[in-house]
Image (cartoon, coloured by chain):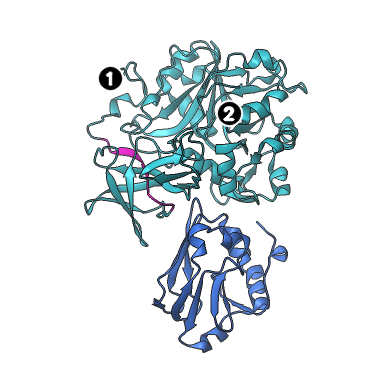
Amino acid sequence: MAAASSEPLRKTILNPVHRALGGTMVDFGGWEMPLWYPGGAVKEHLAVITAAGLFDTSHMSVIVGRGTNIRHFLNFALSKDIAGLKIGRAAYGIILNEKGFSIDDTIIYPLAEDRFGLVVNAGMSATVISHLRSLPGGEAFSWTDLTGVCAKLDIQGPAAYAIFRPFVENADAVFAKFPYFSFQGDFDFAQSAVHLRDGTPILLSRTGYTGELGFEIFLPAAKAANLWNELLAMGAEQGLTACGLAARDSLRAGAVLPLSHQDIGPWPFINNPWPWALPTDENGAFTKDFMGRAALDPATAGHTLPFAGFDPRKVETHGAKVLLGGREIGHVLTCVADMAIGRVDNRIYSLASPDKPENFSPRGLVCGFVKVSDPLAAGTVITLKDARRELKVEIREDIRPARTARKALG
Amino acid sequence: MKDIKDLNLPEGLKYDVEHEWIATAAPFRIGVSDFAQDALGDLTYVELPEVGATFAKGDEFGTLESTKSVSPLFLPVAGEITAVNEKLNDDPGLVNSDPYGEGWIVEITPSDAAQLETLMDVAAYRKHLETAGH
């Protein structure tokens, strides 16, 4: 990622809080972040499936672009068609280069017709701003990097809404209509119309990286520790659990969400499980001109596919090969264990599945993504091979069932 | 992670640089240290060897797996596997919760008991942890 290992690690405003909680701290994208807390990554993962988890994601970067016709400019710069994206609705898109390679992924927030927010990955703001400035017309806009100024807490899981709602001023009005991938408030906190009950202005986004119901809460960095501590105190009875990056990684993999620079990166962004990030019509034809479009050819690009296995055993993510009938057809991108799922009579159930078998007690399943030369149908069994073992896994359309991200609030 | 001073490092065991421990009398039980289980995090799977398998000193005889990683287990002395802890198949977390008790991994018959003398006692292992910069 962006920071070289010789540079000192950056720390979020919550770093002392993570240390006080006994978090195991690691380098992630040049930031010192909690991998897990003493309760452990399995408990954290399961809390998000059955109750709720709280994540510090303040290492991510918020960029605000400002200027006349910025929507038109960003609609060329991003893979997603945002021509009709309403103010108050968010969208997921990819920042592609001229080769159709992913520079980074982003959630786009139209704040006003002349002001758009982009949330990108840790350490990526300078790269992304430099790229945007280099595009035709990009110098005409002002680009502000709010990294470090703006903190972000993610509260995710079926109990997230019930736990968080009492913290929000005018909650009846704020939550009256709050669908998945919408937001309220502003990254310019001085003009945000959404506040916590203690007066803290926030931007509240009904998004996340777990596949579960919840919010990403953007707020002034100085207010983050207070909200973190109060949420954990008030939410404890309902099972709210502080979660680190390991649980975030296993939750997102089970939810078939990509990790930027691992599952998407310097290869053409096409033939993957995220076609909704591309501007395609029902026939797969592109509906707009955008950076990288000419290089996205489904006939020549490889295929990125989700898989799940039959037990929790894994292969090393780095260097593991993919075999089909003994022939090497690609390599592993992500390989983790989702500990909330298991197979019964070969069907995958989650702890959250309403129709799970009695006494269902999953041991977890290996899952992730492979990048292969062949377009494999769901159900195809492939072999993952590293120096230690050969592991049979199944190509999947989806991995963890009964996810709650889109459920109605309340 | 735990500070070294907070680690549970029992007397009377021998330790190797890969953080396995071994009992010094029959049954020669083997597991991993509190340092190792703390560093690996919650275990989700333990791959155990077959009873009767034989290994040289330092051979990989199984794995400890977390949600994100696969870590090899190395035999601290050469020998034959005489028992494996079957409870770990259903509850790999025993290695985390009780690394020297319920979370033992295998028992062996050493092929050369003198190899035990090449391993560290608890004072030397603690010093190894401190000087290795953990």
Q: In the rendering, what colour is chain A? A: cyan
Residue interval drawn in magenta? A301-312
- Which residue position holds label 1? A285
Q: For residue A214, which numbered disc appears in the image?
A: 2
Left or right for A59, reference B54: right
Chain for numbered disc 1: A
Compared to residue B133, the image places residue A404 above or below, namely above
Where's residue A249, x and y in %? Answer: 51, 43
Query: Mark 1: which amino acid?
Result: Ala
Q: Is residue A46 magenta?
A: no
State the residue at coordinates (65%, 15%): A174
SS for tag 1? loop
| Distance from Cα at disc 2 to Cα at disc 1 | 33 Å
Q: In the rendering, what colour is chain B? A: blue
Residue furthest right as drawn? A198
Chain for numbered disc 2: A
Left or right for A3, reference A25: left
Where's residue A137, x and y in %? Answer: 45, 17
Left or right for A252, reference B99: left
Q: Quadrant of residue B20?
A: bottom right
Closer to the camera, B91 or A280? B91
State the residue at coordinates (42%, 74%): B51
